[in-house]
Image (cartoon, rainbow, N blue to C red):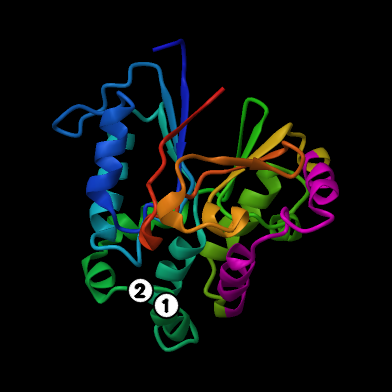
């Protein structure tokens, strides 16, 4: 491996064994799912659970890798993480209907431990790594929480630590929005967002690549660069029959 190679993956959605296999193929974990990536860095961009068979198994794998290599393995919060937290915190609220519509599994909810919930609630929603801005969702909604990565993450963390169901719902709603970079004015929108958050390019999951390039997920074979080369989409649509992409960045 080159010095400090950088890998990203998003939207595992319960496909724990696929994640482990992809990380093995990338040389990041061994056959026992132990970190062996030396100085490589791995970022997982959210949506670990729902839709697929073993969301909590995905959490356990990622948390274990973080414990083994805390300087190397990092994770962001996606919309399904705030959804899971909302279901636990406000089970009688409107989260329940959205959870069912969006592939929520009782097996995941029932298996969540206090340690899982604490970890989920600690996740940032944005990160800057080199010139990249990492985010789960292809939305400008993040800017409603601040004018810097630090401010955005602080604001969302304050919501997570509150007892305000309405503010939780707002985080869910903003992280669920999409396609803001794929519209006709997408390149201009991206340039403004990157200028405000002081980054050179965006990497995101959330919106499956097939919907961006108008093809079945089963035909997706890699990430897609769009918005005049400013944005890289990495969600292959695993739950939709596509690949779970483990992408090495330049």
Q: Residue furthest left?
A: 32
Q: Residue at x 46, y 48 (%)?
A: 220
Does residue 201 appear in the picture of this structure? Answer: yes
Mark 2 or 1 closer to N-term?
1
Disc 1 crowd rating (10 Å Cα; few below 14, some 14-19, many 20+) is some
Residue stretch rendered in magenta on the structure: 166-194
- Residues tagged 2 and 1 counted as in contact (Cβ below 8 A): yes
By secondary structure, the bulk of the magenta-drawn segment is best described as helix
Residue at point 67% right, 51% down? 152
In-front residue for pair 200/248: 248
93 relative to 161, above or below: below
Residue drawn at 30 percent across, 63 percent down? 52
Q: Is residue 87 above or below residue 248?
A: below
Q: Is residue 93 left or right of residue 112?
A: right
Q: Tag on residue 104?
A: 2
Measured from the top left, where is residue 248 in percent x and y?
47, 28
Q: x, y percentage for residue 191?
A: 82, 42
């Amino acid at each position: 491996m080159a010095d400090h190679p950088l890998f990203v993956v998003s939207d595992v959605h319960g496909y724990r064994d696929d994640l482990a296999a992809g990380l093995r193929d990338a040389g990041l974990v061994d056959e026992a799912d132990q970190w062996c990536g030396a100085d490589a860095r791995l970022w997982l961009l959210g949506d670990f659970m729902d839709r697929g068979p073993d969301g909590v198994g995905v959490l356990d794998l990622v948390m274990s890798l973080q414990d083994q290599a805390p300087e190397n393995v990092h994770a962001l919060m996606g919309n399904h993480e705030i959804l899971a937290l909302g279901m636990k915190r406000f089970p009688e609220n409107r989260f329940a209907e959205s959870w069912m519509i969006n592939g929520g599994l009782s097996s995941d909810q029932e298996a969540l431990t206090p340690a899982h919930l604490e970890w989920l609630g600690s996740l940032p929603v944005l990160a800057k790594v080199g010139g990249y801005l990492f985010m789960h969702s292809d939305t400008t909604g993040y800017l409603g929480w601040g004018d810097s990565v630090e401010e955005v993450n602080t604001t969302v963390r304050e919501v997570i630590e509150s007892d305000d169901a309405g503010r939780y719902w707002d985080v869910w709603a903003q992280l669920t929005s999409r396609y803001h970079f794929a519209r006709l004015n997408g390149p201009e929108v991206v340039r403004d967002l990157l200028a405000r958050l002081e980054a050179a390019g965006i990497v995101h999951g959330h919106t499956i690549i097939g919907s961006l390039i108008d093809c079945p997920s089963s035909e997706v074979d890699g990430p897609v660069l769009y918005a005049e080369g400013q944005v890289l989409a990495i969600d292959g649509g695993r739950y939709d029959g596509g690949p779970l992409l483990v992408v090495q960045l330049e």
